[in-house]
Amino acid sequence: MEGEKNYKKAVSPETFVFLGISVIFFGYVASVMGIDKMFNTLMNTAHYLLIDVVFFIMAIAVLAGAFGALLSEFGVVALINRFISPIMGPIYGLPGAASIGMLTTYLSDNPAIIALAHDRGFKQFFTEEQLPTLCNLGTAFGMGLILTTYMIGLGDGIEFLMPVLIGNLGAVVGSVVSVRLMTRYTKKYFSGRPQKTASESDLKAYFKYREVRQGNVLERVLDAVLEGGKTGVDLGLAIIPGVVIICTLIMLLTFGPSEATGLYTGAKKEGVALLPAIGRLLNPIVQPLFGFSSAEAIAFPITSLGSVGAAMGLVKEFLEHHLIGPNDIAVFTAMGMCWSGFLSTHVGMMDALGVRKLASKAILAHTIGGVAAGVAAHYLFLFVTWL
């Protein structure tokens, strides 16, 4: 049953499978780099990511969190919501209230949609078959503001502004694909059950008021900025394991020996260049879909499956090595936002919604949605640059 703890034998076949995979992986890397160089590179890369990447992302998150809180406090989010809400039905097949979920996760992270889904006032506007789709809808916009701000900040001036905006549009396309696919699964799962939602008048009343902080305008500004900034700090801390662990391993598999000497020195950002080799094999498929500038670029979407924070840590390195361009930024923004580490959160989110049995369907739908987001961003970029 859902919610119960899982138990296995203390030593089972998966114990030996795990040991075998670990030995093969680290044995392969050590055979290429040397065991001492491998461990030195792991530690140096992890330290570099923590100091130079995580705290940079955290600073962006603090500023974005403060700005997002101000937008919410003074009704800008409510204003945007009024424009988005009427189109939710035709585009997503969801009630207008779902737009609040999009904006909430865009300003924060994936799990924010769960808090909304458990709010009785919000929940009443969704049928039983629509509620599970909120997981895919919210995830498609997780950390959107932070990712957008970070990507724009990597360029000179407004160099990446247009690609990032195109990436945001690509993420919207991916979210539509993901939600529509998920809706097909939920309709089959809940078929035969009566579906009830709140009336249109109740929906209008729900959007009529917004909660604000106590005090005068200056006090509300200070409270919003500080609370929003604190949310950014929490998000920055939350991404540390993903960035340091996942990104260290991905960089180990992405980059090669020292560019200066062509030898392994144990320095940061060295590796066995396995992912580029895989990327070159997949290039006939990947290139028409995403238009990546280099084989190394495939590391970003792979990483964003587990942690978009870790994937963000790769972009700076790709730019410094001249491995990516504006099209890649557009595709990265779209896929990073749409996937936003969903493999690490989807099962828990579906469990929180009480439909863990649909987790595999949600993952499949969102995987397809992320690919659609990247493809849409690539061809939108080509279209805009062609004009």
Image (spheres, rainbow, N blue to C red):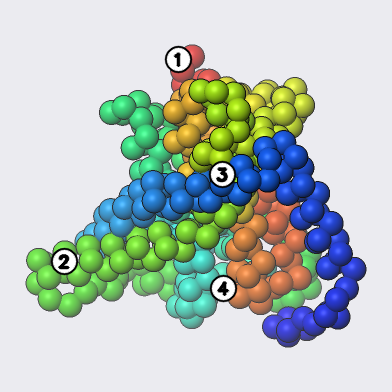
Q: Which residue is mark 3?
A: 41
Callout 3–callout 2 Cβ contact below 8 Å: no
Q: Which of the marked residues, 1 or 3, is nearer the chain's N terminus?
A: 3
User: Is residue 70 rendered to the left or right of residue 140?
Assistant: left
Whole-number angstrom distance, CA of label 2 to CA of label 1: 44 Å
Mark in front: 2 vs 4: 2
Q: Which residue is mark 1?
A: 387
Q: Which of the marked residues, 4 or 1, is nearer the chain's N terminus?
A: 4
Residue at x 35%, y 60% (from the top left corner): 232
Residue 66 visible to the viewer: yes
Residue 333 position, x and y percent, is: 49, 39
Whole-number angstrom distance, CA of label 3 to CA of label 4: 56 Å
Mark in front: 3 vs 4: 3
Q: Which residue is mark 4?
A: 197
Residue 47 position, x and y percent, is: 46, 51
Q: Which of the marked residues, 2 or 4, is nearer the chain's N terminus?
A: 4
Q: Which of the marked residues, 3 or 4, is nearer the chain's N terminus?
A: 3
